[in-house]
Image (spheres, rainbow, N blue to C red):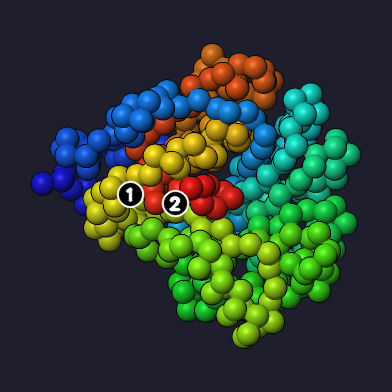
Amino acid sequence: MIKSLRANHHILANTQEQLRILSEGVFASGELPSFEDRLNLINDYPLKPSSIQIFQVNIGYMCNQVCKHCHVDAGPDRKEIMTRDTMKMCIDIIKEANIKTLDLTGGAPEMNPDFRWFVEEANKAGVEEIIVRSNLTIILANPSYYDLPQFFKKNKVRVISSLPFYQPDKTDRQRGEGVFEKSIKALHMLNEVGYGQDRTGLLLDLVYNPAGAFLPADQLQLERDFKKELKNHFDIDFNSLFTITNLPISRFLEFLLRTDNYDDYMEKLVNAFNPSAVKGVMCRNTLSVDYQGYLYDCDFNQMLGLKVQKAAGQHLRDFDINKLENREIKISQHCYGCTAGAGSSCQGTVA
């Protein structure tokens, strides 16, 4: 019988506690293989990068929402925020290493007071694609954000936004009361300036996370459903839908423990392991940077405090592209979430 962890019903703010829970439970019984075991079986351990093409920079954990599935544990009370000096280090490295994509995330990245400066400087540095992961409702949070659609357009930002479902009840249950209505208003504002429209080049993508302890459905079919429903009922247009598997970290891990779903969910991830997805996991071409400038193999490792391999240099001030591209990627049991089924990354399915 798989070991139960039902006694751990508490806020999992301590990263070591989260790692302990991930390493025990379903894996302590010996009934299921560890992620390292699975990689060994397909001759892909240690996991290595391909090249660093994407700088995913978390510029602060502050957010105007408190979403139930948030692996960042973001919210209005979070004070961690990236300074302009750290942003300058990012820009210098982007130019030096010729990194083409800057992926800005949070929290709500727009709440960082230097957010707009960072975007503008990245454009000057020649970044080919700037992604902003917006929760949509920030656009309506107060008048200082009302012009964000125009700012995004001016700077040719690719907007990727979370929308749990095309109906209000599921969205509001996951992200808070009234979020769906505000999200629809924000999507209209983005559509009005050209986002999601043919031949404008202004990309507006949506992200779907399951609301419960299960894997997302087929990405292409969900995209068709979202496009049909949002167009027919709200006259909303967007480009692509990305499905992302919820990883057992922070608030979602707490949810799994509180609802007695942890063991079953982890077993589901392990049994859905897809060797083909390993080739496309985002840690192979993406480097995650936290608000202090520390480096991680992915955004999920960042939230678990798992910095990149020490020999590769763990901070922006020690950045060495050759060492980083030859490092061993740190893994743990949560990595099963990125290789389950069709695989999962910040750009959707990978296999």
Q: Position of residue 341 (x, y in %)?
A: 39, 51
Q: Position of residue 159 (x, y in %)?
A: 71, 57
In this rendering, would 201 be left or right of 9? right
Q: Which residue is mark 1?
A: 272
* Between discs 1 and 2, the one toward the N terminus: 1
Q: Which residue is mark 2?
A: 342
Closest to the observer, 164 or 101: 101
Secondary structure type for disc 2: loop
Q: Residue at point 16% right, 44% down?
A: 3
Closest to the observer, 50 or 108: 50
In this rendering, would 190 be left or right of 20? right
* Residue farthest top in this picture: 311
Residue type for callout 2: Ala
- Real-space Cα distance between discs 1 and 2? 9 Å
In this rendering, would 225 be left or right of 57? left
Q: Position of residue 142 (x, y in %)?
A: 74, 67
Vertically, is 160 above or below 197? above
In this rendering, would 172 be left or right of 146? left
Dot 1, how many residues are within 10 Å of its Cα: few (below 14), some (14-19), or many (20+)?
some
